[in-house]
Image (spheres, rainbow, N blue to C red):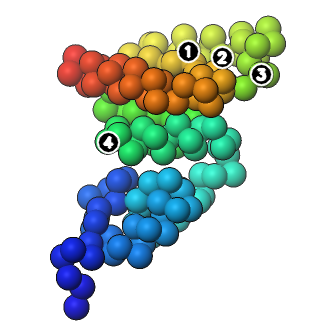
Amino acid sequence: MILSHDLDYCMCCPDQIHYRQFTFSVDAYGIPMCQDCVRQYIGKIPGSTEVERMLYAALVYKGIPAELQYSDGFKTVDIAIVPARLHIEVDGDQHGRADQALIDLLRTMFSLGDDVVTLRIPNSLVLEKLEETVSILTRVSMSRQQAA
């Protein structure tokens, strides 16, 4: 029998998880996740960067319903907050090149047609100002959800 104080909750879904699973997932991935969510997360790791995963974990930890490596059927974005119609692209140095910047701009334009806002966050902002970045993204997400 598992005592109620031995249970906690997955931050990605409403499932309860045992303390051992809670501890494992926090130690391994930075947020408490059930086994199913860990499997989904692991499947998305190859397509994401460490900086993207860092921002994703911080958003989820703050209670934001973020999705890592989200596909809208046409493109995959680094992080999406679907209820807020918000896409987040975490950009490395390659996004400063003109050809890549033009592709990024076109992707943003097409997303705006679907009433989806794309925010481009440089790696340096996540690495040096994670808490402030998450705070601002939380406010933007909540504002967009309320406007919907």
Three-letter code for the amino acid on which mark 1 is drawn: Thr
Which circle marks residue 3 in the picture? none
Q: Nearer the viewer, residue 142 or 85?
A: 142
Residue drawn at (26%, 58%), measured in percent from left and top? 14
Mark 2 or 3, nearer chain start: 3
Task: Kindly report the distance in space between the C-alpha atoms of the residues bearing marks 1 and 4.
Answer: 26 Å
Give the residue number, with chain letter if any, for mark 2.
104
Q: Residue 82 location in percent, x, y? A: 37, 34
Label 2 SS: helix
Mark 4, Cα crowd under 10 Å, few <14 / some 14-19 / many 20+, is: few
Residue pointed to by mark 3: 93
Q: Quarter of the image for the C terminus: give it.
A: top left
Q: Which residue is mark 4?
A: 63
Question: Disc 2 vs disc 4: which is toward the camera?
Answer: 4
Mark 2 or mark 4, which has the lower sequence index? Answer: 4
Left or right, residue 75 beside residue 135 = right
Badge 1: residue crowd in 10 Å (few <14, some 14–19, many ≥20): some
Q: Quadrant of the N terminus?
A: bottom left
- Image coordinates of residue 41 in percent, x first then y, are 53, 56
Amino acid type of the residue tagged 2 in the rendering: Asp
Q: Amino acid at mark 3?
A: Asp
